[in-house]
Amino acid sequence: MTDRNASDSTSRDFIRTIVAADVDAGTYDRGVITRFPPEPNGFLHIGHVSAICLDFDVAAEFGGRTHLRFDDTNPETEDMRFVEAMKADVRWLGFDWGEHLYHASDYFEQLYAYAEELVTTGQAYVDSSSLEEIREYRGSVTEPGRPSPYRDRSVEENLDLFRRMRAGEFEDGAHVLRGKIDMAHPNMVMRDPVLYRIRHAHHYRSGNEWCIYPLYDFTHCLSDSIEGVTHSFCTLEFVPNREIYDWLLDNLDVPRPQPRQYEFARLNVEHMVVSKRKLIPIVEGGHVSGWDDPRMPTIAGLRRRGYTSAALKSFARGAGITRVDKRVDLGKLEYEIRADLNPKAPRVMAVLDPLKLVVTNYPEGRVERLEAPFFPHDVGKEGSRTVPFTRELFIEREDFAVDPPKGFHRLSPGNEVRLRYGYVVRCTDVVHDESGGVHEVHCTYDPETRGGDTPDGRKVRGTIHWVSASESGSARVRLYDRLFSKPNPEDLEEGEDILEQLNPESLVDVSEARVEPGLLEAEPASHFQFERLGYFFVDPVDSEVGRPVFNRVVTLRDSWAKQQSDTPTRTPEPKTGRPSATPSTPRVYRPEEPMAGARFDDYVGLGLGEQEASVLVQDAPLAALFAATHAAFPDAGTVAKWVVNQVPRVAEGRAVEALPFGGDELAQLLFLIDAGEISGRTGREVLEVLAAEGGSPRAIVEARGLGLIADSGELATLVDGLIAENPDKVAAYRGGKTGLMGFFVGQAMRVSGGKADPKVLQKLLADRLD
Ligand code: ATP
Ligand code: MG
């Protein structure tokens, strides 16, 4: 495998360049100290592998150390179970935090003292406004905020109130502590951020000791400072928070030199969602069996699927550290696990979809034990077992064809095939069942071909796997496919829910596969290659003695890429609905031909997704429409999405050049959506009209009354209806499941046919639900 270990990745990314400069300049005499700071509100995922490798690798490369710190300041969502699972995951990856296990909740007392310091120095105040008022006074990106009426409370009054907040004299929401910074600051985060809130809730570690809890921005920089962290790495969504990180440390009496925050791009993987918060509804909604379901992008799920820590680390390190958001091809992850398992996993035989094969000239009752090596391709590797050969065998149903297509080298009437490590057999008869399907096949075997060689040198092209019917065992085999059908499951249309993107065929459960007898004793958590089928892992949770459950880790090759290059199609997105007994892995998009490759790179440079770029490279008329539209509408990524995904849909098989609209009209349509005059969903309707009749997008919108409903009276009636219809969801939302906002927005969009103005809608919903 491409054995990327920690030291190979020292090829300097921007983070390592910064750390090296600090080390050279002697900025910190405490050495390099990093931390990995997850919030224990779920399980770690593959994106975290990237953060963990960065935190631990960088410290190790510079002779420093890494702390594991639980960022546990949210009493409602955190849980000991998550803490333990996260520790197990980091350890399994092979990293060691030594004695440096910390919890932000350990610092509650010190954090409180820092907060009092801010109050005393006049840099924080107690605000008694409601959260809604605070939100309203904060202004927007385009308007400055306004000061709260409580902003000028005296230091004494603030101190008194803050102490009484701590003492439990007030109810949730009665007051908050805010930094006194600048209500007109261009960075919204700096408009007097809330630092503490009242929450009478039980905390999984501190119990009921506290009823005020510090917020992330206050906690994080100070936890780093308390632990002596030097370099604090996080993902790009925290860029705006860097200013408050520095402001707090600058304005408090903390040890110097203080830690600094640096941001890098999240690791995203195609067909996966990597954010705990977005994974919670998948688990809680019962769409998978739990956080460690082998389809989950969690470390625990991938481990249970059969991924190794070496493969995950190699993948994360190979993806590198940048400041540009990326979504990495799933094929790269699969490549890593194949490369890791190839030299390690013994080859064995199993039949997933058994078809009986009767060797009519083989004596009944005879059992021959045939020698079969575990590593047939690797002469250096020892080890073999015997497989029983009998008169009745099972072969894979798809390895037989009554009417073989051209190029089919497996078994068909009258033809010969080699049974792996066994004999050459010739099909003499097919027995059909009542419905005309194949019930069993009859063959004769050639006794001279034991082991598979033909002494007369005749050619037998196909070799298939098999097991004995009477001497094999039964096992459960689970074939997993991607959890989300779309490469980017987060690319949602308005009102669409991410759960709608779940791949309904992500699991094929084969309850009665036939396996060679030795496999019944397979150790839990061991790996095998089932010849011709893929790599499998003995599920450590569901397997029982003598009754193993095998999870397919990955297929043997990237069959999706092959399928694609055989039959080029316009949209390289996998079709769902395909029988997925052999689910495929995604294609590699960049074409090999140099000119096409260069055009592909240009498209990607413009900001297009790899998938869109690969389609445009292959399709000249679409590329021309893209260019014409992009000449008028500046956002290339949006143009590409519409040209690649929507235009072929409305063309319904017609040539793109023959459609009654061109780049100008498409650009006008995109401007209407961009300006918020119509929704994306309506935009697609307008495009259908354009494709059918031509015309001007604006005229179509006006003639058909498709503009957004921005009238708050009309929308309020709709929202009230929804609230009345969904009392359970409303209660859950008010109980803290704020993720349900997505549900309400989605429903409102559906009811309004996609015409509700999202801004007005969101505000109405927030008002009515809070
Ligand atoms: P949540 O959705 O609850 O915010 P999360 O998935 O973002 O969860 P955190 O606990 O917030 O996880 O993250 C812990 C650390 O891991 C942070 O420093 C964060 O920046 C980093 N991290 C989170 N997701 C990724 C990712 N996809 N790629 C790289 N680093 C990540
Ligand atoms: Mg996060």
Image (cartoon, rainbow, N blue to C red):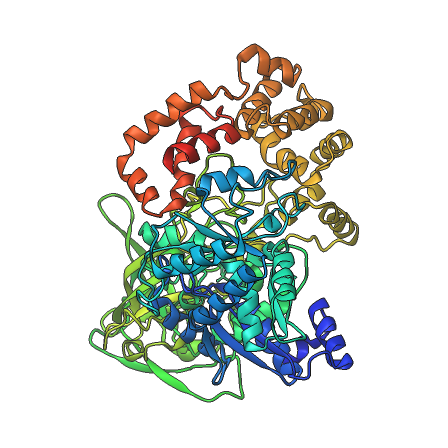
The residue at the point 52 percent across, 31 percent down is 759
Report x, y in % for residue 24.
77, 81
Q: Is residue 550 left or right of residue 463?
A: left
Above or below: residue 254 compared with residue 747: below
Report x, y in % for residue 532.
45, 66
Quarter where residue 530 is shown:
bottom left
Above or below: residue 144 compared with residue 351: above
**Most foreground residue, 630 or 145:** 145
The residue at the point 62 percent across, 25 percent down is 654
For the question of whether residue 5 can be seen, the reply is no
Q: Residue furthest left?
A: 365
Report x, y in % for residue 643.
65, 34
Question: Which image quarter holds the N terminus?
Answer: bottom right
**Most foreground residue, 98 or 597:** 98
**Most foreground residue, 357 or 28:** 28
Above or below: residue 749 compared with residue 426: above
Report x, y in % for residue 344.
48, 80
